[in-house]
Image: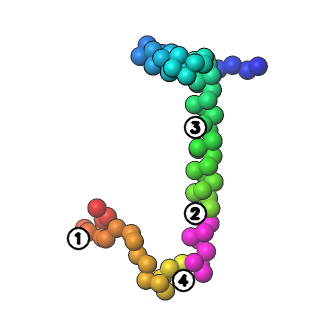
């Protein structure tokens, strides 16, 4: 099985060791779980962003938002930049 060497500071190793002990598992299992969770979260956010962008590129939706008078964006400041 492929492996990856990852360097941790002494403090990070102490915290990792404590977390693994608290969970009753190995340090390797904690790192794998955290990595898998981070990858899944990144994938979900990327997919959600794609859906969001596709939805708001829809001209019918843009027209409906404009017709409803919805504007929940930040108010422009005197310099034209959002606060």
Sequence-earlier tag: 3 or 4: 3
Q: Quick check: is 54 in the magenta stretch?
A: yes
Residues packed near mark 1 inside 10 Å, few (<14), some (14 to 19) or many (20 plus)? few
Q: Nearer the viewer, mark 3 or mark 1?
A: 3
Which element type, helix, strand or loop, lies under badge 3?
A: helix
Mark number, residue 52: 2
Q: Is residue 7 visible?
A: no
* Cα–Cα span, label 4 and label 1: 28 Å
- The residue furthest bottom is 67
Residues packed near mark 3 inside 10 Å, few (<14), some (14 to 19) or many (20 plus)? few
In the image, residue 1 above or below residue 77: above
Magenta stretch bounds: 52-61
Q: Nearer the viewer, mark 3 or mark 4?
A: 3
Q: Residue at x 43, y 83 (%)?
A: 69
Q: Which residue is mark 3?
A: 38
* Cα–Cα span, label 3 and label 4: 37 Å
Dividing the image into 4 quarters, which one contains the N terminus? top right
Which element type, helix, strand or loop, lies under badge 1?
A: loop
In the image, residue 52 above or below residue 7: below
Q: Is residue 59 left or right of residue 78?
A: right
Q: Residue at x 49, y 86 (%)?
A: 67
Q: Is residue 4 visible?
A: yes
Mark number, residue 63: 4
Q: Which residue is mark 1?
A: 78
Sequence-earlier tag: 1 or 2: 2
């Amino acid at each position: 099985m492929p492996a990856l060497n990852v360097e941790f500071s002494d403090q990070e190793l102490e915290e990792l060791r404590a977390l693994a002990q608290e969970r009753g598992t190995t340090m390797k299992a904690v790192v794998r779980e955290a990595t898998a969770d981070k990858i899944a979260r990144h994938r979900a956010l990327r997919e959600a962003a794609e859906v969001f962008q596709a939805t708001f590129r829809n001209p019918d939706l843009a027209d409906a938002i404009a017709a409803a008078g919805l504007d929940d964006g930040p108010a422009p400041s005197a310099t034209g930049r959002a606060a």
